[in-house]
Amino acid sequence: MIPLSAFLLKQTFDPIGALTDVPDDPEPQLAYWSNGKWDAMSWVDRHDVSAAQAGDIFVVAVGRPRSAPGWQDLLSREVPHLVFSEPPMSYGAIAFCAIDDSIDSQLLRWIAWCFGSGSRLLQRSSQDPRFGLKIALNVLGSDETSSNDNGSVSRRARLGFKVREMGFRTTAPYFQSARHRAARSIPTDGFRMDRASDLLASVGGRAQQTMLAGSVAGARSLRFRKNLSSLGELTELSATLVRWSRSTSYVQTLPWVDNIQLVEDDDLLAELQEHLIEQLMADPLPATVDALLPDDLLDVEDERAIRCILFPRERRDNASRLNLTIETIARRICRSGDPTAELATELRFLDDYDEVIGKVRLLDCICADLVIGDQQYLAYDGDFYKVDRTFAERIDTELRQLETSAIAFPAYKAVTEPQYIGLIGDQYSDRFVVLDRELIYLDGETGVEASDLVAASGALIHLKRKGKSSTLSHLFLQAANSCELLRRNVEARRIFADLIQQKAQTAVLAHQIAQVHNAQMEGRGLEVVFGFLGDWRGRTITSLPLFSRISLVYESRKVANLGFKPTVALIGDPGGQPTPRVPTMRQRTSTTAAGVPAQTLSAADNRSARRARQ
């Protein structure tokens, strides 16, 4: 049995264009199969592959010098009768099979069969990113893949199917790759994957399909073992794999797989980026485009906060930016002669001491829902995703059913969460009890923060600045974990009541909250508020990034199932005016030509004023 690994090249790539940089010494070996015979080809004539026809096979074999492994050095020293080549070589080969496209017979497609280290010779950008995954899903989910062509549903599809391994990209609370493997085939529900928001990347199991009977693993490539009597057999197999990759029979049992897909096609990425630029240059700005403050630049225990945001070549003494709004980004895109390059520029985030906390691209700070034709996409954290529109509509429909809290919150003016909570503690202590960073500890368990604030109505309030999904997910998890602890544990409720008694500024407020909690704390409709701090002009809760909306829907379900009443609060500045920085001594003693204090102007306004004085 020969291990095989098959990749489908994108339509814009031929075998030569798909190769990475290959070594000149030794020179790659080339051969091709056409008209029933093999012929050698020189490396100089490698571009002749453009004249290939369906059925042709083009083979590249590359040897790379490598350092000898430690065991080889040991044996060569100890056993003089053993001879190893110098320098040691690592060999890899690719057999490119040309086939007619199953949809467009005028189009030639290439399947790259990789042997040894051959897969390292392929550019990642040349590969169809879901070729192997879709085939594996189809062959693992049905008795015979070909039987799905007539639309019938096989017994395995009706009953579901089992797999041995799954790999996926998690989206909350942090983006990361995860891979789980079972000792035997188990149902897909047995793997720890959030089917609502995680992105399936690979799947493996035992196939029943005759041609691929045995273990199959699919991601970018399809990997399996098969006896081959000749390379010519790969041509027929290539055509079959392309046909299977076009099937969507897996949707019958795994409909959630295509809810959200990472876009990796270069042409589509370029189109989506151009569409995003058009949205940013629109007047007025659509509510579906927003800016995200990357709070994940900071460690959880880091006491620093983002105090200033600088664009490239911008000086600290000219900046007065405490927050990042989509209007600021849009103005910069409109002024740029190269908007695409502008999206790739890096922003610097400074703390109170003007030290750089971190740098991110401008594109990483934008989230947007994009619609092109009848397809919906998402721009988020520097990546683009294709989203099933009906799935997004279901999420938003459920999100709109969440009630808005009736609690009146002070205006938020682009400060950090601790500063905002501190403001409430100083000026509104008759209406709120501050419990930020106060933890409930039970024997044998980690500490849990019950809430950031407790309102006079008894409501438990959890606050977070509007930012990336990785940041907001902590808000949702904190609220759900708090509700679960208070619901199931009497001792936790007692400790929580003591905290309120200690932190309340007046006995009247503590007594008022205690009365509500005594009546409602045991899961009888006590309000739990998800509070979002940020710029909300012209936007609603559905303006949050899709991954945040998904997390909010699912965690609010948990809160409601525990007997509490989840609500949301969008806390911003009604006036929409940013809070000015504290001016320096030089700024306090200088004015513009119009007599306006310099620190109240933006950097662009200051430049205009200087030109006016000149």
Image (cartoon, grey):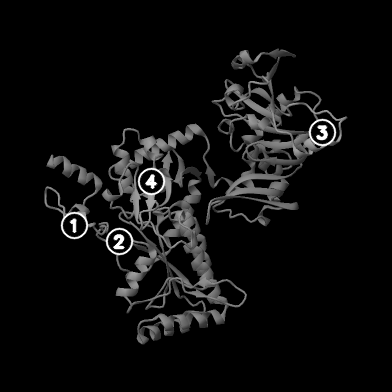
- Picture quarter with the N terminus: top right
Residue 413: which disc?
A: 2
Tag 2 secondary structure: loop
| Residue at the (67%, 45%) spot, across then down | 203
Disc 1 crowd, CA 10 A, few/some/many (<14, 14-19, 20+) = few
Whether 507 is drawn above or below 46: the answer is: below
Disc number at residue 588? 1
| Marks 1/2: CA–CA distance | 22 Å
Q: Are marks 1 and 4 in contact (CB under 8 Å)?
A: no
Q: Nearer the viewer, residue 283 or 26?
A: 26
Q: Position of residue 333 (x, y in %)?
A: 32, 39
Q: Nearer the viewer, mark 1 or mark 2?
A: 1
**Dots 3, 1 in contact, CB < 8 A:** no
* Type of amino acid under label 3: Ser
Q: Residues within 10 Å of mark 4 (few under 14, many from 20)?
A: many
23 left or right, relative to 509: right
Q: Is residue 515 left or right of residue 185?
A: left
Label 4, label 2: how far apart the Cα atoms are: 21 Å
The amino acid beneath tag 4 is: Leu
- Whichever of labels 3 and 2 marks the residue nearer the N terminus, that label is 3
Q: Is residue 57 visible?
A: no
The amino acid beneath tag 2 is: Lys
Find residue 76 and name its label. 3
Q: Secondary structure at mark 4?
A: strand
- SS category of the residue bearing label 1: helix
Marks 4 and 2 in Cβ contact (< 8 Å)? no
